[in-house]
Image (cartoon, rainbow, N blue to C red):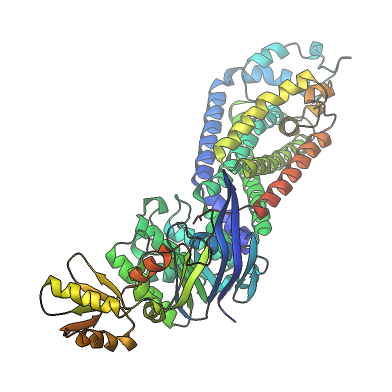
Amino acid sequence: MNLLGAELWRFTSRRIVKVTLVVVLLCMTGGMAIAAWQSEVDLSSRYDSYSEACFENPTYNTEGEIDLSECETIVAYSDDGRVRLNDLGNVLSATGVLFMLVAILVAASSLGAEFGAASLSTQLIFEPRRVRVWATKSVAVAIGTAAITAVLAAVLVAQFTAISAWRGITAVEDGFWNDRVLDVARLIAAGALGGLLGFAITGFARRTVAAVVVFIALFIIEPLLYQVTDLFDARLPLYPLIAFVTNPFREIAFEAEDAWGMGTLADAVIVPVVWIVALLVVTGWQFRRSEIR
Amino acid sequence: MHAIEMSGLTKTYRARGGMVHAVAGLDLVVPVGGVHGFLGANGAGKTTSIRALVGHLRASSGEIRLLGARIPHELPTVIDRVGALVEQPSFFPNFTGRRNLALLAKSRGIPKSRVGAALATVGLTERADSRFATYSLGMKQRLGVAAVLLKDPEVLILDEPANGLDPPGILEMRNLLQRLGNEGRTVFVSSHILSEVQQTCDRVTVIARGRQITTGTVHELLATADAKFHVRVPGDQSERHVAATVLTNAGFEVLLDEKGELFVGVDAAHSDMVTKALADALIYVSLLAPVERSLEDVFLELTADPNASNGASPAGGAS
């Protein structure tokens, strides 16, 4: 526990963690301020009844879309720019991808800095069991990135709820908050997985910049591979993780090809988990055997 | 049980043009207590041996024991009794000195109070809350030594601890090492600042090309080296040449330096034979004095001869 405590302290003390958290919070707050400013308060009484009526008891057509004949002003409603609490699920999914990228960056930077400063050589004088050190570092990164994501998600939910109450629409579907709790839990898990993926890839690359280059390459190469052949469907690490965050599986008209070959949310989490475990085992083995400088 | 034992330690690296033997069958014994110097030129294999000793690299062959524990497998069983500073002190540049030490202390469950004590011991209290990146080389070195002291270790392994220190810092370091050695701890210190080693260490081991050349107390090393006597005879340069010829004919090793000073290689027990040989030739000695030799002289003599290490590694070394 001493080692984990020290690793968590080291992680949270890092400047990039604090700076990244502050920058993302400021960006989110700025975005929310703009959304609040654009919200048309004067039109709220006019559209509330339509939109609420529409969403409280929606009827769907044969293609699974909301039957617009029951809420004719739906087009005007969509264009009024108002903050609707009912959209929080979509906002969480979209912003969750950003949170996951933040987790990857922070984790990669955290381990990359250790290799860069060669601080591992000093640390191993205090704890020479390298597998234990590696495992503890990865657990600390997972906890740290999950905590960062939790903070960001909590602030997002709070800001969105407050703004929708102040200048928007608070009407929500049944079971709305239960679904949002699950969304936030999924985002936190994705943050931890993103952090572990960043950690594991930096374990190979040994440098933050090299790890970031690998991730950019994955972002570019993975979709190309999906387009060229089905061979890689549900087999590469990054886009399944993105699918886990965005959760396209809940869409009524969902098809596996929309989620890079994955059929369910379970697929989207299992694929990156397998990658992460494999990468952690290999890098851990490598760390155990390598010369430390 | 010895504090440190190495037997046939070998570390070989692949390199362009063949294998490089950084350490080539090093034998070393460091007894418990006192300050033990580990001497060698750059590339002799000092740092490689120390890195193997603290488990940072795996030896190609040979055996290492630290406080009786086999290294690297049993290192965790003795790590709390060992402190080490290997090469440059490596800490997080954006953390303060205090925080860097506190993190290390926390990872081992060492009380926080020891951080302040260690910083005070190395004279870093005033700058403890500055970022490591802002430290001078000497301050970084002090922080490295403070990290070594955190565990209150029985064995301290220090690789060039005086690197970057100014003269007062070197003096403080010397006093600290001597104090630690006098407290009954074992201080194993590698260095190539031989005057420091001579003043600080009780025992020394000299290595070259990855092998031990000699080991013993500083006094033993100075005594076993070829003794020389300065001989002065009355008269001019020609008299000294005659004296040199007489001594050479008597079987002594003679050196007449560029200033015309005469030196004879002879141990103290047989120095009377010099005066006798000259007196027999009717040359009377006005001065016969042993030449004071430093560890540096001995070291240079020992390491200059490539055959001194019983067949040194042909591929050279690395440190």
Q: Residue at horizontal 58%, vertical 62%?
A: B52
Q: Quadrant of residue A194?
A: top right
Q: Is residue B238 left or right of residue A251?
A: left
Q: Residue at horizontal 37%, vertical 81%?
A: B223
Please state the horizontal and vertical placement of residue A225, each as a whole percent of the image.
Answer: 75, 23
Pick whichever, A50 or B186, lies toward us: B186
Q: Residue at horizontal 43%, vertical 69%?
A: B118
Position of the N terminus of chain B, as image quadrant, is bottom right
Number of numbered callouts drawn? 0
Q: Is residue A44 left or right of residue A27?
A: right
Q: Quadrant of residue B202?
A: bottom left
Please state the horizontal and vertical placement of residue A286, each as a whole percent of the image.
Answer: 68, 49
Depicted A184 relative to depicted B113: above or below: above
Q: Is residue A275 left or right of residue B233?
A: right
Pick whichever, A272 or B202, lies toward us: B202
Please state the horizontal and vertical placement of residue A198, each as a whole percent of the image.
Answer: 64, 40
Residue A84 in sight:
no
Q: Is residue B226 left or right of residue A161?
A: left
Q: Residue at horizontal 73%, vertical 34%?
A: A237
Depicted B87 relative to depicted A197: above or below: below
State the residue lying farthest toward the right. A62
Residue B310 in sight:
yes
